[in-house]
Image (spheres, rainbow, N blue to C red):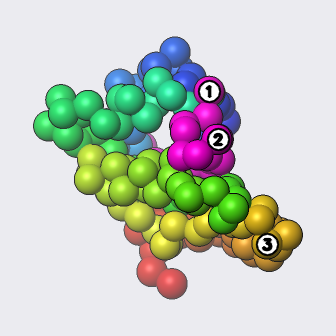
């Protein structure tokens, strides 16, 4: 298990040593990636995720398909009082799929603007480890 800010992906060498290769002792399985991200201002990427998002958006990244051995889920934290609600989460979720990742459940977007952030976050947190573990093992629900 590696837990880090998105921009640490390069320092941790996650693409080279993990995501672009199957798990060494179980090549038919996948690596799990959970993305929890906010959007700042009016659609801006958070400071600790800018480098990661730029990597996802590069044209050369598409050719590499670096997430082909990844099962992932995305949780966006946002506020519908802004025009670009959960823009970063929507972008990351879409790009991970385009770059070969396997989405294990639909993107979830929690809304601080309604005061009901927990109604989305709590169920996601309570079930996501079970869900991603099954998905990485290739088990069906």
As for residue 55 lying within the magenta part, the answer is: no
Distance from Cα at disc 2 to Cα at disc 1: 9 Å
Q: Are marks 2 and 1 in contact (CB under 8 Å)?
A: yes
Residue under pointer 3: 114
Callout 2 secondary element = loop
Residue under pointer 2: 40
Q: Which mark is residue 47?
A: 1
Report the front residue among 2 and 107: 107
Report the front residue among 46 and 65: 46
Residue at left 55%, top 39%?
A: 44
Residue at left 54%, top 46%?
A: 43
Q: Quadrant of the N terminus?
A: top right
- Residue 93 screen position, x and y as percent: 43, 56
Q: Is residue 8 left or right of residue 97?
A: right
- Residue 84 screen position, x and y as percent: 53, 55
Badge nearest the viewer, 2 or 1:
2
Instruction: Name, please, the residue furthest toward the left.
Output: 63
> Mark 1 Cα within 10 Å, few/some/many (few <14, many 20+)?
few
> Mark 3 Cα within 10 Å, few/some/many (few <14, many 20+)?
few
Residues shaded magenta: 24-47
Report the front residue among 83 and 33: 83
- Residue 9 screen position, x and y as percent: 50, 26
Q: Earlier in the sequence, mark 1 or mark 3?
A: 1
Q: Earlier in the sequence, mark 2 or mark 1?
A: 2
Q: Does residue 69 sit above or below 66 in this rendering?
A: below
């Amino acid at each position: 298990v590696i837990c880090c800010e998105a921009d640490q992906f390069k320092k941790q060498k996650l693409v080279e040593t993990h995501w672009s290769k199957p798990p060494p002792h179980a090549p038919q399985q996948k690596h799990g990636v959970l993305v929890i991200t906010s959007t700042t201002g009016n659609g801006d990427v958070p400071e600790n995720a800018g480098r990661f998002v730029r990597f996802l958006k590069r044209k050369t990244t598409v050719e590499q398909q670096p997430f082909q051995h990844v099962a992932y889920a995305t949780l966006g934290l946002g506020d519908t009082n802004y025009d670009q609600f959960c823009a970063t989460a929507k972008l990351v979720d879409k790009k991970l799929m385009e770059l070969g990742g396997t989405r294990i459940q639909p993107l979830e977007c929690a809304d601080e603007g309604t005061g009901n952030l927990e109604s989305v976050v709590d169920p996601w947190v309570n079930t996501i480890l079970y869900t991603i573990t099954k998905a990485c093992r290739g088990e069906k629900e």
